[in-house]
Amino acid sequence: MRRSSDLKLNFRWQSVIDLKQNIENIGGQLLIEKGDPKTIIQSLLEEYSFDALYAPKESGTEEIQEEMNIITLFIKRKADVHFYAQTTLFHEDDIPWPIGKLPDIFTQFRKENEKQTEVRNLFESPQDLSSSISVSKNFDFSNLGINDVQPEEKSVLNFQGGETKAWERLNYYMWETDQLKEYKDTRNGLLGESYSSKFSPWLALGCSSAKSIFYQVMKYEKERKKNQSTYWMVFELIWRDYFHFVLKKFGSQLFQKDGIKGSEADWKWDLELFEKWMNGVTGVPFIDANMRELNVSGFMSNRGRQNVASFLVKDLGLDWRMGAWYFEHQLIDHDVASNWSNWAYVAGVGNDPRENRYFNILSQAKKYDAKGGYIRYWIPELKEIEGFNIHKVALMKETELERIESFIPEIYLKPIVDMGKWEY
Ligand SMILES: Cc1cc2nc3c(=O)[nH]c(=O)nc-3n(C[C@H](O)[C@H](O)[C@H](O)COP(=O)(O)OP(=O)(O)OC[C@H]3O[C@@H](n4cnc5c(N)ncnc54)[C@H](O)[C@@H]3O)c2cc1C
């Protein structure tokens, strides 16, 4: 199976096309090639004999290996290489510790940085990229081998890739509809575009950056409102930073079964259970609704992600890396550091200082979807069931079920775990 879904690849392709357009608007050119980066850059070096390479610096281990391969090519030709750390809010040279001494607890990382670390200024956008060399070649979308699928209309947002759309979303969320001022109260929502920023797909690809969002929040605080919500948006960006630095510190260890903490857990590789989880047919409505949303839109709320991850690891006993792998495949906002570190955290092999954190799915559902609207939206087969009962069909009495005329699929009468264990 491929590492990325068509939904994810389409978003990436849209982002590349938007970048191409924006570069051409100021007289530049973008050459698009498909294949192994080292081979392609080698042949470009031969064709054009470049003086220097300028590129962003990544945190992923495979990405760093790719960077090393490319650096070697340039060194052999005595050309300059400039890699810029531009993914995070805080520059890695400015945080109060060398990467190897990064604190193991987020709160310490956040507090020290809030006290000591300045966010560097943004770079000016270039105004003119014209050049005397011509590199343009046509690149045909059909060469990519991606099926042209779009997120379903039911998705929280019509996500389209590219910097232009990233700014549209930011302007809409912060400036046109003023939703930022309520972020802290709404961010655990499940339905609709407004409960959270939805910046993540653009951030993951570099269509926008943590720094540019940070400076927009600062502007908003000055011109509109400064409150707990504006602070919380920056707080979440610091979480993102932390996970990027964690990946830099631990490298490939993060992808091992025992994660960065080590554990005695005996994870299973049960493909039948895994497929039920992936396809959203576990019989636990809150899990299935979230997985259905992920499968047709490439997105899931943070609350949903925590629940489906905990369910896979703690209720099904599956190896956490199976879940992380599927998220990597499916999420349009997949970001290697945020995804794998969050999964390790939920599985108890990451940076969570609390032992054995467990999500009781029914009590989570009661807290975040008490009336069942989220289930009715994603599992319409159950929509006749009233109120919170929709979350616990399997626990309803036969007499109660008999009164419901609509068809209830068997899986919701026989879920793959005993839902009776969850008090709510
Ligand atoms: C198991 C699991 C896997 C995840 N995988 C990813 C992933 O691949 N890519 C990804 O960007 N996020 C991931 N997250 C974090 C979080 O769920 C998403 O960033 C968030 O839901 C995206 O929606 P938003 O942009 O509306 O977030 P908002 O709530 O509006 O937050 C603003 C920004 O802060 C950052 N952020 C918020 N929460 C987190 C967090 N817990 N960890 C890291 N950054 C955060 C994101 O960049 C986000 O865009 C994962 C969380 C879990 C529990």
Image (cartoon, grey):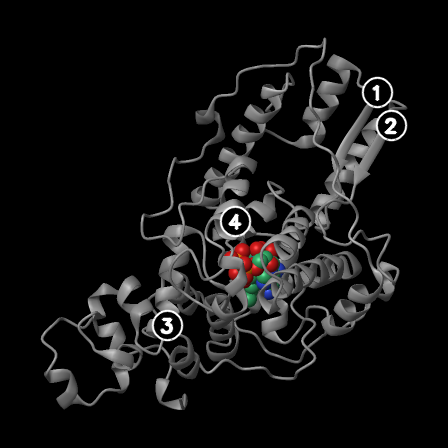
Please provide percent x and percent y for residue 410. 22, 73
Q: CA distance from mark 2 to mark 1?
A: 6 Å
Of 173 and 33, the residue lying toward us: 173
Quarter assignment of residue 94: bottom right
**Can you tell which mark lies on residue 80?**
2
Classify mark 2: helix, strand or loop.
strand
**The CB of the residue at mark 2 lies under 8 Å from ligand 1:** no
Residue 300, quarter of picture: bottom left
| Number of numbered labels in the structure image | 4
Pointers 2 and 3 in contact (C-beta within 8 Å):
no
Q: CA distance from mark 2 to mark 4?
A: 42 Å
Q: Earlier in the sequence, mark 3 or mark 1?
A: 1
Three-letter code for the amino acid on which mark 4 is drawn: Trp
Q: Which quadrant of the figure contains the C terminus?
A: bottom left
Between the C-alphas of marks 3 and 4, the distance is 33 Å
Mark on residue 51? Answer: 1
Under mark 2, the amino acid is Asp
Work out whether residue 257 or residue 335 is closer to the camera in this orientation and state it: 335
Marked residue nearer the N-terminal end (1 or 4): 1
Q: Are marks 2 and 1 in contact (CB under 8 Å)?
A: yes
Query: What x and y, as percent, mark residue 122?
Result: 74, 42
* Residue found 47% across the figure and 72% down from its top: 307
User: Label 2 crowding class (10 Å Cα cut-off): few <14, some 14-19, many 20+?
Assistant: few
Q: Residue at x 38, y 81 (%)?
A: 366
Q: Nearer the viewer, mark 1 or mark 4?
A: 4
Characterize the local packing of mark 3: few (<14), some (14-19) or many (20 or more) Cα atoms within 10 angstroms.
many
Is residue 382 shown left or right of residue 112? Answer: left
Q: Which mark is residue 175?
A: 4
Mark 2 and mark 4 residues within 8 Å of each other at the beta carbon: no
Residue 286's tag is 3
